[in-house]
Amino acid sequence: MLKVKSLCAGVAASTMALMFIAPSIITPARAESAQEQSAREQSQIPTCTKRLGTIAIVEPETNWWTQYGLGSPEALLKVFVMRSGCFGLVDRGKGMAAIQAERALASSGDLRQGSNQGKGQIKTADYVLVPDLVSKNSNAGGFNVGGLIGGFIGGPVGGLVGGINISKKTADVVLTVTDVRSSEQVAMTEGHSKKSDLSWGGGGGAFGWSGFGAAGASGYADTEIGQVITLAYIDAYRNLISQLGGLPANASEANEMQSVTMNRPGRLYSSPSTKAKVVRPLDAGMMLYPTGNKDGVWWEVKDELGNQGWTSSLNFELAK
């Protein structure tokens, strides 16, 4: 009998002990708050120790974002580019329109003397970046954004655009980078995000990405679908920077030289001297292609038939 009581007492003591230690064993890990996840996702925007070139961001052809009360994804990607430091950013949108207005004032003589504004000052974009949705070839149905846009604009476009699903809170986006000199498409990456990627609960405003609205990317920080799209573009931008690691240090030098046009008759010589053998005569208006080799005013060029030689740069101008 004493053994039974002793055993029961031991079980009771063990049970009491478990009652005190069990909570520490079964308590689930604390859920990540929206603010914490916001900071974590922002930290995943890649940064570069040196620039990969100069880039212009332009809007895709279909302005799907207006259906959600969102700003253009062009503004969103500008924030990423500025924070990453991977590219120099040139404005080819509203800022460029304002610049042209200033230059019109300069050309009409209305600006003050010494304003130092004129031709030859605008920086060239090495690349163009287009942020868009992943296209789908099948008809977009249900709540897919393709079906929604199709209801507004009609035609086949509604069936081609299909990167957002409203009911599932998912977004599939694409970033395309094109070399402005060669027109070569040097990169295309996709990004994906879904509602379960985020810690909802405090409402869309709890996401707390500052600066998006001020940059013109309105609606991406304070709406659910806007936040999903934002994370999808971060995913795509992260993939993009990884893919572009092999870009040349100087995009201008890596491309073919700009063609030239003879503005007066001349000759093509076998070497940079008028005493060298004449390869062929050159007529005014003829287009030539520089190889990049120079010797004073002499440039090595090729004609459209493949003939190669030297001619004086005093006899030609950049092709227009």
Image: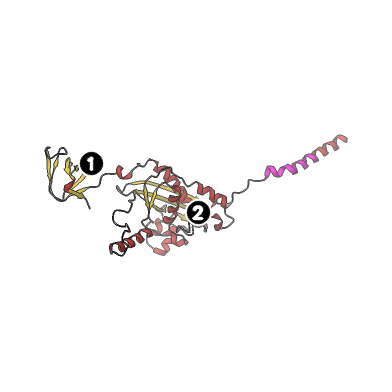
Q: Position of residue 33 (x, y in %)?
A: 59, 51
Name the side, left or right, on which 270 lies relative to 57: left
For disc 1, the neighbor class at 10 Å (few under 14, some 14 to 19, many from 20) is some
Q: In whole angstroms, how far apart are the C-alphas of marks 1 and 2?
A: 49 Å
| Residue 228 disc label | 2
Residue 277's place in the image compared with 111, above or below, is above
Foreground tag (1 vs 2): 1
Which residue position holds label 1? 291
Say whether marks 1 and 2 touch (CB < 8 Å).
no
* Residue at the right extreme, as displayed: 1
Residue 45's place in the image compared with 152, above or below, is above
**Amino acid at pointer 2:** Val
**Predominant secondary structure in magenta?**
helix
Residue 304 visible in the picture:
no
Residue 27 inside the magenta-drawn segment: yes
| Residue 25 disc label | none
